[in-house]
Image (cartoon, grey):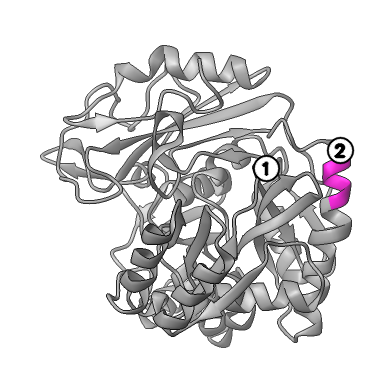
Amino acid sequence: MRILVVGGGGREHATVKSLAKEGREIFCAPGNAGIANLATCVDIKTNDIDGIVKFATENKIDLAVVSQDEPLVLGMVDALQNAGIRAFGPNKAAAIIEGSKAFSKDLMKKYNIPTAKYEKFTDSEKAINYIKEQNSYPTVIKASGLALGKGVIIAENFEDAKEAVIEMLEGGKFGESGNEIVIEEFLTGTEVSVLAFTDGKCVKPMISSKDHKRAFDGDKGLNTGGMGVIAPNPVYTKDVEKQAFEQIFIPTINAMNAEGRTFKGVLYFGLIITEQGPKVIEYNCRFGDPEAQVCLSLLDTDLLEIMNAVIDGQLEKVDFSNKEGAAIIVMMCSGGYPESYAKGKEISGINADGQSDKFDYIFHSGTAIKDGKYVSNGGRVLGFVCLGKDVKDAQDKVYANIDSVKFENSFYRHDIGGKI
């Protein structure tokens, strides 16, 4: 079987690793230096729909897995299916649930799915007046479109909020993605990430997880694409899970069906557990990153079986299970991330396969090969995964060994999963 995974980060590395079994030939576009040890990397950009369709057709791909937000929102799954290629991921109509925060907030309001109070704006003066009237801080300001996980500003006061509005709506900070913004009330509670497979009829969640978005220890610094994750999330109890199913998961799937936008793929529920119960912070139309790296490491069912069942509308028939225990990933990043950073720094402490026996696995997010050696090639560079009997056990393992790998100006958070 020939499989194409579209993407080139840690999430795609984890996806490729989960799919790479005997009898399967894996391609990845564009991939990275770590993925190249498991798959044939193809130099095609993730948003090059024509290029991906052409490659898939010419190389007789049996399954294409589109795992990044931009190509999904642009309609890559539609294009592949129209060309006769079997594809995993939501179509363009369904991917809007991430592609437009304004759409997703309106969906939740219309179908009574618990979320923060909000308003939408395209005019900066009206947005600023609204913030002034609410006079409630912190307040959350989001670019409505895709912004690589960085289009959210949590403003602690009026001046910071005003600056964020002007930067987005007038300064073009997030390009077209910030032409419309959503201003939300700030919800207090503990965040939970739930990645759930759905075929538009049933929902089968993976193990819950907790992301750490801020760049530095103690949740300081700017929001990033994610500095580390633990799974399972200790606040996601059976009672909370029951509430989430009844009030959020099933209503969301039903709402998308009612809107003629049936969602088939992986739906990411970004939740916050408040005193009133779970509420939705955001939806993503694909695996989270780096949540996928820990959740897939704990998945006990063959990922290909699940993907095929989703496409065929047969997910209910899959015997879905996770491994016992817990997992952690800690991201090692380039100095300066999530703002400007240098690339091309030689990485020491990993072997020829880009791995180390000190960890259960190292997922490459931004690496390349230069003169036969691994070098940094992004903001988030490597993700170190350890499994354990519980979160503390996994945490102890990763932090006991992470300093064995390094590159110039690299940094990581020392408190993923809680202070140690």
Against 57, residue 134 (above or below) is: above
Which amino acid is tagged 1? Gly
Residue span colored magenta: 239-243
Closest to the observer, 171 or 23: 171
Residue at 74 percent of width and 26 percent of height = 324
**Sequence-first disc among 2 and 1:** 1
Q: Where does residue 166 sit, x and y in percent of width and height? A: 33, 73
Q: Where does residue 180 sit, x and y in percent of width and height? A: 46, 80
Residue at 37 percent of width and 58 percent of height = 160
Q: Secondary structure at mark 2?
A: helix
Structural crowding at the residue carrying mark 1, measured as other residues with C-alpha within 10 Å and reported as few (<14), some (14–19) or many (≥20): some
Closest to the observer, 81 or 71: 71
Against 343, residue 57 (above or below) is: below
Which amino acid is tagged 2? Lys
Q: Residue 242 colored magenta?
A: yes
Q: What's the magenta bit mostly, secondary-structure-wise?
A: helix
Position of 123 compared to 378: left or right? Answer: right
Which residue in the protein does label 1 denote? 189
Q: Nearer the viewer, mark 2 or mark 1?
A: 1
- Of all residues shown, which one is farthest toward the left? 371
Which residue in the protein does label 2 denote? 238
Residue 250 badge: none
